[in-house]
Amino acid sequence: RLAARIREMSRKQEGDETKALADVVTQAAAAAPAAPGIPTNDAAAAPPGGKPGPRFRLRQNQRSPRSPIVRPGAGRVTQTRGNRAKPMIWVHIHKAAGSFMCGMAQRAERLVSPNDNCNWRKHDGFPDLMKRGSSMDCKRRLETWRAARWSWGALEREIRPEDKCWDDFDYGISLREPVEIMHSFLNYDYVNWHGQPKDSLLAQVKQKLDAHAADHPGLPQWKFFDNIQTRLLTDSLDVPAGEITKTHVDKALELLSHFSVVTRVEDLQREATRKAVFKKLGWNHDVVYKQASVERVANHVKKDFFVFTEAEKEWLREINKWDMLLYRSINPIQAE
C-alpha cells in the first residue's frame, strides 16, 4: 500500500515530487521506523562569469526533450530484479550508453520515480552535478528505495562519498573509449544544447590547459575533454585543467573494484558480450533486448557535424592519457 501511495503522489504532484515522497515515507512510522526527510537543493548551479554552460540553462524541473520521464510501469515489465539480492545503481557516464541501459531496464526493473532517463530527479541527474545538497546518505536512500520497492536507478553525476553504499546496493557502469566519448559529446551538445563547434571548443581546451584553469563550480564543456571519466568517478570536477594524475586513476580503479558490473560500450554493441553483461544483471537477453526498440532508447545524434582529424585524435589521447589508462585497465566482458 505504501508503494502504491508513493507512486500515486508522484503522479499527482509533479511540481514537488521529492517532498511528497518524503511525507509518505514518514507517515509509515506506525508500521515501520520512520524514514528521515529527503533533502533537496533547488539552488541553480552555473559557471562563474561569461556565458552559462548549456546544461545550466535548464530551469528548475525543466527536462531535456531527449531525457524522458520513465515511470515504474513504463512499457511491459517482463521480469523484475533478475537474480540480484540488492537494487542496482547504474553509474551513467554521459554519452557512454546510459540511455541504452535505461531503455533496457524499463523492461526488467522497477525504476526510481520520479526520474529523468532513469536518474532519480533532484538527486542523481545531470543537473545535479556539483550540487552537494542533492545527495542523500545510504540509510535514507535504502529506506526510500525499499519502501517503494525500486530495483533500478541511474546516477548521471560525480560519485560522492555518500553515494558509496556498497553493503546496500549493487553498482554497474559502462566506460567508453575517450576519443569516442568526446566525439559523441561534441556533436550531441552542438545539436541539442547549442554547444560550441569543434574548432572553438578545442581552442578553449588548449587555453584552459595552458592556464591550469579550474572554472568551478559548474561543468563547462572543456572539462569533457580533460579526463572526464576519471573526474566523475573520483569526485574531481574541481581539479584544474591538466592536473588529473595517475593517483586519480588508481582511486577510480579502487572504486570500480566494488562494482558488480563493469563493462565497455563496445561490449554492449556485440550480442555475445551483451548477453554476458545482461546475465550479470540477472536479465533474460532474448526477452529484454530483442523485444525492445533499440533505436528508440539509443540517445545519439544520427549525423556527425564534426569529426576529429588524426592529428586532433593524437593530441586528445595525450591530454586524456589518464582516461585512456582507466579505459584500458578494464577487462573486456567475456562472451559465454
Image (spheres, rainbow, N blue to C red):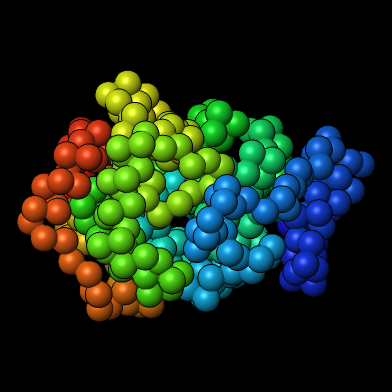
Is residue 146 in view from this perspective?
no
Residue located at (40% from left, 66% from top): 195
Residue located at (18% from left, 66% from top): 307
Q: Quadrant of residue 140?
A: top right
Residue 42 vertical placement versus 9 (above, below): above
Q: Is residue 304 left or right of residue 97?
A: left
Is residue 328 in view from this perspective?
yes
Q: Is residue 328 left or right of residue 84?
A: left
Residue located at (14% from left, 53% from top): 312
Give the x, y percent position of residue 77. 51, 68
Give the x, y percent position of residue 310. 7, 56
| 248, 8: nearer the viewer | 248
Give the x, y percent position of residue 277. 29, 50
Residue 85 vertical placement versus 195 (above, below): above
Q: Quadrant of residue 285?
A: bottom left
Residue located at (25% from left, 75% from top): 305
Give the x, y percent position of residue 256. 36, 32
